[in-house]
Image: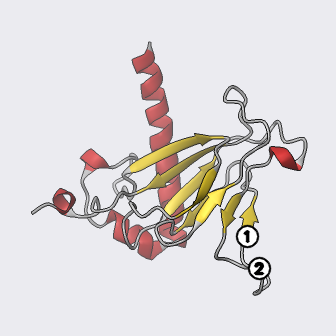
Amino acid sequence: MLLFQEKILEDRIYRQADIAAACMKKYAPQAFQNMAKHKNPSCRIGYSKEQPFSGSTMTLDYAAHHHRDVGNMMGGATAITTLIPNKRKKNKRETSLHVLSSYSLDGSTPGVAIDLPAGSLCLEVSREEYHGSTRVAHPWRFTPSRIAVVFYQGNLLNYKNHGRK
């Protein structure tokens, strides 16, 4: 039974990766090209011919400290998809914000916090950009206020034989 459920989850992740890849190809074509340059289906996720992603992480009401993803490939991008509406969002304390600390809306005060809505896609260069997320006041895994899937490509996985000679 578990194997069947794992296959369903794999199928959904692969389809979501294809959607994220198509958006990346349109809105961040150079990063997409860098990531899809060398094809190695054994370490890629998705069904399409051009598969830029090698991994995914699913998060539920997750708070991330301020960091860069230095294990991601140089010249690539990360895609963050938000999957479900926040049914528990009754007040601002139940909101998980995606924070980009190096950006500014007014040119003076650094830091932008984004409440990513359901169905959204956020593309970022997480290897270079400091980012994080705020925690919700009452995280609960059975009814999370946010589920996100992050797609990325690990360092050296964009090279044939994963950079080995």
Identify which residue is drawn at 51% across, 69% down: 125
Q: Please give left or right for residue 153 compared with residue 130 in the image.
A: left
Q: Nearer the viewer, residue 104 or 42?
A: 104
Q: Please give left or right for residue 126 compared with residue 47 in the image.
A: right
Quarter of the figure with residue 138: top right
Per the rendering, the mark at residue 22 is none
> Residue 57: image x %, image y %?
49, 45
Quarter of the figure with residue 88: top right
Q: Which residue is mark 2?
A: 105
Q: Which residue is mark 1?
A: 112
> Three-letter amino acid code at disc 1?
Val
> Residue 69: image x %, image y %?
46, 61
Compared with 156, 55 (above or below) is above
Disc 2 and disc 1 in contact, CB within 8 angstroms: yes
The residue most toward the left is: 165
Compared with 14, 164 (above or below) is below
Identify which residue is drawn at 71% across, 34% down: 144
> Residue 107: image x %, image y %?
75, 87
How many labels were placed on the picture?
2
**Tag 1: Cα neighbours inside 10 Å, few (<14), some, or many (≥20)?**
some
